[in-house]
Image: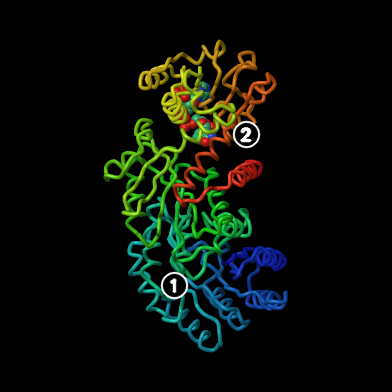
Amino acid sequence: MAVPIAARTPDQAHQQAEAAQAAGADLLELRVDYLEGLSVELVGTLVGKMRNAGEEPPRMIVTCRDKQQGGALDYPAKLRVDVLIGALKAGVEFIDFEYDNFRVIENQERIRLALSQCSRGRLILSAHNFEGKFENIGKLFRNISNACPGAIPKLIYVANHINDCFEALDLLHQTSAERIVFCMGEAGLISRILAKKLGGFVTFASIDEQNATAPGQLTIKQLKTLYRCDAIVADTELFGVIADPVAHSLSPAIHNACFAEKGLNCLYLPLLVEGDRQGFESFVSHALLRKWLHFGGFSVTIPHKANALAYVRARHGSVEPLAARIGAANTLLVGADGKLIASNTDYAGALDAIIAGMRISKAKLNGLAVAIVGAGGVARALVAGLSDAGADITIYNRTVERAEKLAAEFGCAFAPLEDVPSVDARLLINCTSIGMHPNVEATPVPAESLKKTMAVFDTVYNPAKTLLLKEAKKKKAKTIDGIAMFVNQAMTQFKLFTGHDANAELMRNVVCDSLAQK
Ligand code: NAP
């Protein structure tokens, strides 16, 4: 893993290098285009000091990026080539030069000569596109490889949609020489993580978010701890959560922690799939077509749960009956025959949380008076699960027509949200986002309406102790938090994905730690 050192002064560069090595960097990329007052001597001294700093001299790439290709300060081409040649003489392992500038004969001749005169320095020939995909990435790769056969081609472009990553992944899959290929931007994130699986020469990571040198660059801690980069190998099985937005999702943290605990050769990715049904279908088709990626299943959340169901139906996969009734799937499993199996672990996760929280058997849900506040996706899963178990449900919602429609579908009662204060039920469930961070002072049900005889379940899990639950606790009502449901549905998915039981306590701790950090 290479960590860019992007400092204005040599002192700052030393500090960053120490932090990068302490965090486990294998390679330091000295981005000397960030240095003020750049000169051959300045870089030579910096490289020399760094090589002598610790017990183990760090391996280094020296890059003096052209401002046109993402460089920080605008230094003339001649000085940039002088600096790279000086770095080779100072003994660095790699220099990185832009392919476009290498095609200038004078630059090329000078760099070739310097390479021939040093015993170990190698050239990385790089191309960047900050707008989007290259016109023909395969041709560009061949041109760069042919321009200097001993060099390591580096092709980096911005992914404007996750589907743009497949060209980079294909190129890595189809080539075997040393090469660096990945995508920038949030949509390109998976290509940075999967470069290791596909034999990419190196992945770049920043020391921390403030020191990122390219859009979408992950931190070394995220790559090593969250995405278990050191454990990724060619046949690592992949899973991930398909969502938009996805950055806030806690699913990668909990699944990867459980994979690590069980020593499973699996990795769970955040999959930002923007767009409608077509964007979803195109991503899943691309991912499954490439069997060498080894996708074993997906979690699916907003806004794609209905798209997931439609996709599986259209491809003659199998759909779990209650997922069909809910009209949404949150889990797609790739079967042994390659066909998809769609299921919904939300309702079962919620029902398990209710049964455990109320300390009752599932049979006791039959005839139980339940008030559900909200009529969106989560309410729908709960209404389906609880009506299947025979509960007597009333749905309250701000948009009363939505409550009416859901109630008609499952044979329940409904009422406008204004009627909530007169609620009388054994189980009250909040399925709205009211009370969710940052609006933690809001509650969907006034404290006066809560009773000791009620069990109160809030599906909101950020924060875990919502105002609704705090007030219910004051009334000595039984309370059930949203983390229980979240962990339960994730545990069911983990079992479907791997055949192993997940560690519930570990999952809950990871959720709580992640929320505390946020
Ligand atoms: P959704 O489909 O967008 O539905 C949102 C619901 O909240 C609708 O009924 C909406 O009423 C209502 N609502 C939103 N803002 C409101 C406001 N200011 N006043 C009154 N009603 C309001 O969302 P969802 O997927 O069902 O998710 C709902 C919540 O469930 C999320 O916010 C999240 O906290 C929680 N959740 C928990 C888990 C878990 O595992 N624990 C998983 C997913 C989600 P209208 O119909 O009138 O718009």
- Amino acid type at circle 2 is Ala
Residue 320's quadrant in the figure?
top left
Mark 2: is the Cβ under 8 angstroms from ligand 1?
A: no
Say which label, 1 or 2, has the lower sequence index: 1
Q: Is residue 299 left or right of residue 358?
A: left
The x and y percentages for residue 327 are 36, 32
Checking the image for residue 464, the label placed there is 2
User: As drawn, is 437 to the left or to the right of 335?
Assistant: right
Residue at 58% in and 67% down: 33
Q: Is residue 395 visible?
A: no
Residue 321 visible: yes
Decide: few, some or many residues near mark 1? Use Cα within 10 Å; few <14, some 14-19, many ≥20.
Answer: many
Above or below for 257 versus 134: above
Quadrant of the rendered image containing residue 243:
top left
Secondary structure category for the residue under label 2: loop
Amino acid type at circle 1 is: Pro
Q: Position of residue 333 (x, y in %)?
A: 39, 48
Q: Position of residue 372 (x, y in %)?
A: 50, 21
Residue at left offset 40%, top offset 60%: 293
User: At x 57% / y 73%, what residue is drawn?
Assistant: 61
Quarter of the image for residue 408 reads: top left
Other-residue count near label 2 (Cα within 10 Å), few / some / many at <14 / 14–19 / ≥20 = many
Given contact means CB atoms under 8 Å apart, are the residues at marks 1 and 2 in contact?
no
Relative to the observer, which residue lies in front, 246 or 334?
334
Q: Which residue is mark 1?
A: 153
Q: Residue at x 48, y 49 (%)?
A: 270
| Percent coordinates x, y for residue 447 in the rendering | 64, 17
Q: Nearer the viewer, residue 114 or 151?
A: 151
